[in-house]
Image (cartoon, grey):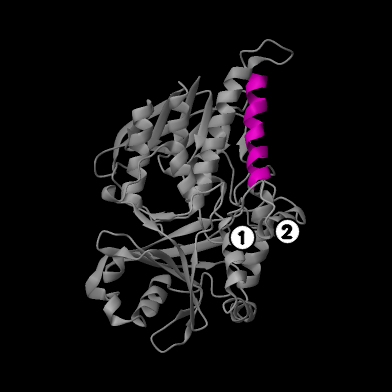
């Protein structure tokens, strides 16, 4: 059994770890070299921390991991600190870790399990057999500066996992485009040297005032990294009428200009440039299964429309994919009515069903939520109503972060389960009909 994984981000490296640990021959193609930077808020909710724990990945503060207690929400002139809930299914803490360190830690963890990671290999297209099945990929080999060397390599495998992010060349080479009926977001962020670096809370700004107190579109965050800096950024959804019409970097500068001077969010304290990235949400690229191919994480649009969280869903999708591949390789060895390939494909197809069952209804609710908060009047009313009521905001945080106990009889868990039962699960097996375009931040 050979598996080829395109991309060594959270999804790719997580899948590589599980598969290699099970004795599967795994090769991962990564276009850059570690350590490398990725645009992200760097915050991990308890949902993502659970995946880190499942991997057995050490995450001590001495190694650059910063624990936090919960969310601090700011809106409507109010500040509300909401500890992460104590649940049986999830840890009661979050983490902050720069992607510079987080992604490399995951990749090295996969390597230690036996995965082969080839850096400076950028995939240009998938390979298909005569029957149309995906059976590998073609990659250009790059030099240390990211330039083509002229060498092109072909890699063959029993199954290919596309974990190459929002722009997924693997999927695009097969005609699997983004969908325009699903939400999309854009986020920008930078780092500042700041005395807030050791903040115990992940801070979310649900309203963004400029220096004059005038409202700016989107939502923002301030996450203490623990290394002397804070990650400060903002995001905006395509449900907002300002989407695609703004200089998002300027919006970030206008927002931070209105913050207290003692926080240090000033140009002279800025570390690195303001960088941006698209947030592919709510299964905005499907199908997640094609013969010989599975889409993981951002490549399959698995960012939550509720809160823009993508790392946890990327890692979970990788775990699901590994489970079905391992199960499928066993099923292929069992004599029966199906050929070995057909038996294997039954399990691969079940991966898409698994993903839809886990998050389909949650993402449908998220699409509704994204549409509502794109209307300023609705958002303002919701904040003015909810912020003064901590018990309501605790429920909202659990809903947005998808933190529920599967077997709990608590009222919050039951209400969330009921809401998800009332909406159809977002489809992840249909073929998109139109391509979605997004303004680059």
The mark nearer the N terminus, 2 or 1, is 1
Q: Position of residue 289 (x, y in %)?
A: 62, 36
Q: Nearer the viewer, residue 291 or 104?
A: 104
Q: Residue furthest bottom?
A: 212
27 vs 198, left or right, is right
Which image quadrant for residue 26? Answer: top left
Prevailing secondary structure class for the magenta stretch in the rendered image: helix
- Badge 1 marks a residue whose secondary structure is helix
Q: Residue furthest left?
A: 268
Pointer 2 with pointer 1, Cβ within 8 A:
yes
Q: Residue at x 71, y 54 (%)?
A: 417
Is residue 298 among the parts visible in the rendering? no
Q: Nearer the viewer, residue 61 or 193?
A: 61
Q: Which residue is mark 2?
A: 419
Q: Nearer the viewer, residue 87 or 294?
A: 87
Q: Which residue is mark 1?
A: 399
215 vs 143, left or right, is right
Distance (Cα) linking label 2 and label 1:
10 Å
Which disc, if any, is residue 150? none
Residue 27 higher or lower than 162, as above or below: above
38 falls in the magenta region: no
421 vs 230, left or right, is right
Which image quadrant for residue 248? Answer: bottom left
Magenta region? 341-358
């Amino acid at each position: 059994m050979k598996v080829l994984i395109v991309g060594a981000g959270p999804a790719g490296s997580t899948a590589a770890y599980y598969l290699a640990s099970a004795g599967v021959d795994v090769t991962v193609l990564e276009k850059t070299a570690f350590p490398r930077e990725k645009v992200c808020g760097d915050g991990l909710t308890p949902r993502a921390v659970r995946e880190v724990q499942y991997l057995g990945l050490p995450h001590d503060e001495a190694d650059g991991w910063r624990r936090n207690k919960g969310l601090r929400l700011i809106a409507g002139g109010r500040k509300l600190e909401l500890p992460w809930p104590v649940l049986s299914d999830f840890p009661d803490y979050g983490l902050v870790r720069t992607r510079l360190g987080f992604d490399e830690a995951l990749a090295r963890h996969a390597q230690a399990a036996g995965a082969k990671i080839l850096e400076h290999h950028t995939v240009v297209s998938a390979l298909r057999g005569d029957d149309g099945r995906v059976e590998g990929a073609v990659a250009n080999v790059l030099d240390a500066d990211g330039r083509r060397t002229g060498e092109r390599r072909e890699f063959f495998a029993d199954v290919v996992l596309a974990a190459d992010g929002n722009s997924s060349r693997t999927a695009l080479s097969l005609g699997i485009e983004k969908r325009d009926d699903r939400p999309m977001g854009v986020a920008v962020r930078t780092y500042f040297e700041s005395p807030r670096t050791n903040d115990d809370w992940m801070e979310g700004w649900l309203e963004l005032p400029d220096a004059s107190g005038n409202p700016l579109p989107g939502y923002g965050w301030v996450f203490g990294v623990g290394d002397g800096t804070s990650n400060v950024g903002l995001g905006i959804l395509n449900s907002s009428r300002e989407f695609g019409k703004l200089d998002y970097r300027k919006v970030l500068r206008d927002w931070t200009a209105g913050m207290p001077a003692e926080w240090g969010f000033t140009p002279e304290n800025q570390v690195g440039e303001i960088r941006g990235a698209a947030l592919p949400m709510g299964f905005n690229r499907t199908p997640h299964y094609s013969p010989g191919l599975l889409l993981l994480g951002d490549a399959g649009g698995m960012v939550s429309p509720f809160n823009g969280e993508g790392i946890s869903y990327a890692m979970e999708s990788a775990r699901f994919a590994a489970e079905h591949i391992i199960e499928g390789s066993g099923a292929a060895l069992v004599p029966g009515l199906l050929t070995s390939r057909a038996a294997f494909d039954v399990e691969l197809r079940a991966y898409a069903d698994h993903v839809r069952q886990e998050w389909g209804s949650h993402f449908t609710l998220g699409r509704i939520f994204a549409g509502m908060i794109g209307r300023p009047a609705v958002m303002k009313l919701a904040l003015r109503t909810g912020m003064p009521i901590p018990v309501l905001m605790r429920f909202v945080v659990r809903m947005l972060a998808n933190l529920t106990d599967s077997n709990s009889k608590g009222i919050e868990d039951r209400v969330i389960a009921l809401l998800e039962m009332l909406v159809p699960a977002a489809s992840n097996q249909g073929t998109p009909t139109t391509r979605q375009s997004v303004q680059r931040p």
